[in-house]
């Protein structure tokens, strides 16, 4: 499966973010999207998810049988930096409601406790109000509801920064288990996380996406190379 980005142009008043951007993402890989502050990482996600407009764009999905379709929001799971959950509900109530309204979209529907276990939310926490969840636990819930319907593309905007070391390791393993049949794009400011988790590194450079080869991943110069590219960018 491939996601082709064609002729993407986006500006905010006098600031141009993307200029005729063309790029292709493939399933089976986790992409790390890096860039200086203001480079357009979140903007790109919001355009993909149809949350904001742009001057021009064409997003095309091609499956393994070369069948082509235009991208739709139903193809996307979007985990934002700040999780938005209904804090007046318990974790159990919210997940139960989500499963009920999406049951026709979910392949091989599982028991509710299976899903909680998938992201390691303890039994005693499942009946707590979401307002009493930590930021990291809310992030887990948000991640969970964005993968249950099995979207083709998973967008992750700084998803692991609020998690402790153990939870980060759990989520990394889960993401790696999902990548084979999904296109996963991770936006992060943490270079070490991108190098540890991602199969490909994409840097927003001069309003374009620049793929940095990971052939030299095991060499110490790889990290230096990426840092030098980021330091040289003028889109901070």
Image (spheres, rainbow, N blue to C red):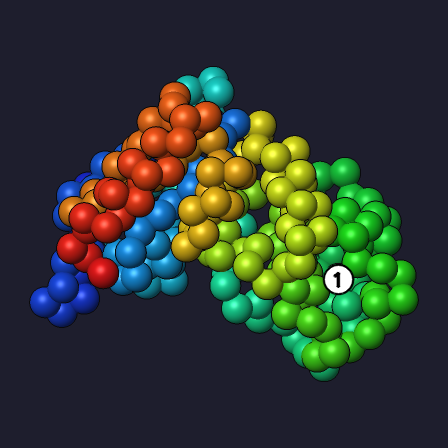
Residue at x 39%, y 21% (from the top left corner): 215
- Left or right, 150 with respect to 5, comes to right
Residue at x 16%, y 55% (from the top left corner): 234
Q: Position of residue 52 (x, y in %)?
A: 32, 63
- Left or right, 150 with respect to 210, comes to right
SS category of the residue bearing label 1? helix
Seen from the viewer's position, the closer of residues 117 and 55 is 117
The residue carrying pointer 1 sits among few (fewer than 14), some (14 to 19) or many (20 or more) residues within 10 Å by Cα, namely some
Q: Which residue is mark 1?
A: 95
Q: Position of residue 167 (x, y in %)?
A: 70, 53
Q: Quadrant of residue 223?
A: top left
Seen from the viewer's position, the closer of residues 73 and 199 is 199
Q: Is residue 185 visible?
A: no
Q: Residue furthest front?
A: 220
**Compared to 165, does 196 lie above or below?**
above
Q: Quadrant of residue 61?
A: top left
Seen from the viewer's position, the closer of residues 120 and 10 is 120
Quarter of the C terminus within the rendering: bottom left
Q: Residue furthest right?
A: 124
**Compared to 127, does 6 lie above or below?**
above
Seen from the viewer's position, the closer of residues 190 and 160 is 190
Residue at x 67%, y 39% (from the top left corner): 173
Residue at x 38%, y 45% (from the top left corner): 33
């Amino acid at each position: 499966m491939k996601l082709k980005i064609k002729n993407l142009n986006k500006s905010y008043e006098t600031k141009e973010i993307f200029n005729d951007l063309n790029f292709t993402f493939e399933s089976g890989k986790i992409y790390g999207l890096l860039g200086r502050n203001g480079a357009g990482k979140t903007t790109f996600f919001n355009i993909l998810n149809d949350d904001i407009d742009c001057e021009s764009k064409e997003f095309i999905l091609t499956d393994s049988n070369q069948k082509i379709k235009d991208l739709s929001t139903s193809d996307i799971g979007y985990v934002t930096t700040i999780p938005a959950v209904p804090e007046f509900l318990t974790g159990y109530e919210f997940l139960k409601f989500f499963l009920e309204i999406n049951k026709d979209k979910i392949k091989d529907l599982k028991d509710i406790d299976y899903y909680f276990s998938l992201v390691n939310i303890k039994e005693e926490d499942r009946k707590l109000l979401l307002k009493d969840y930590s930021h990291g636990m809310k992030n887990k819930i948000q991640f969970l509801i964005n993968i249950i319907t099995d979207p083709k593309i998973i967008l992750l905007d700084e998803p692991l920064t609020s998690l402790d070391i153990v939870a980060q390791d759990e989520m990394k393993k889960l993401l790696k288990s999902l990548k084979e049949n999904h296109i996963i794009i991770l936006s992060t400011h943490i270079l070490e996380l991108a190098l540890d988790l991602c199969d490909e590194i994409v840097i927003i450079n001069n309003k374009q996406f620049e793929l940095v080869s990971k052939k030299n991943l095991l060499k110490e110069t790889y990290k230096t190379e990426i840092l030098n590219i980021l330091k040289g960018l003028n889109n901070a």
